[in-house]
Amino acid sequence: MKMMRRVLLPLRAKVRRKLALLTRGTPDEGPAVQEDVKRRTALRGGLIAAATTVVGVAAGSALGLARRPETSPEDSPSTGPVIAAAADITAGSAKPFTAPNGAPAYLLRPTPDTFLAFNATCTHQGCPVSYVGPGFRCPCHGSTFDENGRVTGGPARASLIEIPVKVVDGQVTIA
């Protein structure tokens, strides 16, 4: 309360001076004058608080931008999370990883120049599929998929969901 009085008294004195009144109220001032002083004091205090907030936010934003680390090409919005180094995956092999949505996935390298990634969830009833040889197999109901994610044996009818990938500076990333 003392702090509030220290702030409000100078504001109230300035308002009273602007209205050509004495610095302190007198008993013969009407209630309308006193209410006007209170209202103008509150308005002036609100304007000061708003201006202080704007300056604080602007300064904080500028400081935040100044302290922000420089971004590298791997951090650019056009490049997603890194899955693996291209050199770590040999042609004809696969590497399991977790997709950004938390689903199990596989990164395949069918040829030296090709990388493919698939969500490792069977399209039949959602069981996790395993990479076996050049394709995938669902342990729950026996569905099989080729290395391009296409169904080669039922009961699944839809292909595995492909995850777009690209190679950036020797790193396989989600595109």
Image: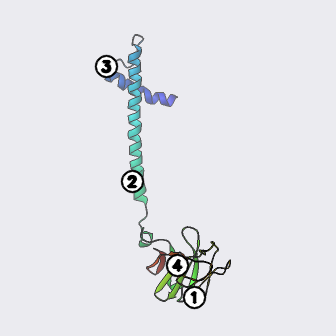
The CA distance from mark 4 to mark 3 is 78 Å
Marks 2/3 in contact by CB < 8 Å: the verdict is no
- Quarter where residue 92 is shown: bottom right
**Callout 1 amino acid:** Pro
Nearest the viewer among 55 and 9 is 55
Real-space Cα separation, disc 2 to disc 3, in angstroms: 42 Å
Quadrant in the picture for the C terminus = bottom left
What residue did someone put label 1 on?
A: 134
Alpha carbon separation for disc pair 2 and 1? 53 Å
- Mark nearer the N terminus (2 vs 1): 2
Can the viewer see residue 10 in this picture? Answer: no
At 54% across and 83% down in the image, what residue appears?
108
Instruction: Name the foreground residue: 77 vs 123.
Output: 123
Q: Earlier in the sequence, mark 4 or mark 2?
A: 2
Query: Which residue shows up at 36% across the image and 25% down it?
Result: 15
Residue at the right extreme of this rendering: 140
The reply to whether callout 4 and callout 1 are in contact (CB within 8 Å) is: no
Any mark on residue 117, and which? 4
Instruction: Identify which residue is drawn at 38% across, 35% down.
Output: 47
Q: Which of marks 2 and 3 is nearer the N terminus?
A: 3
Instruction: Answer few, some or many: residues within 10 Å of disc 1's Cα (few below 14, many 20 plus, some between 14 and 19).
Output: some
Mark 3 = which residue?
A: 20
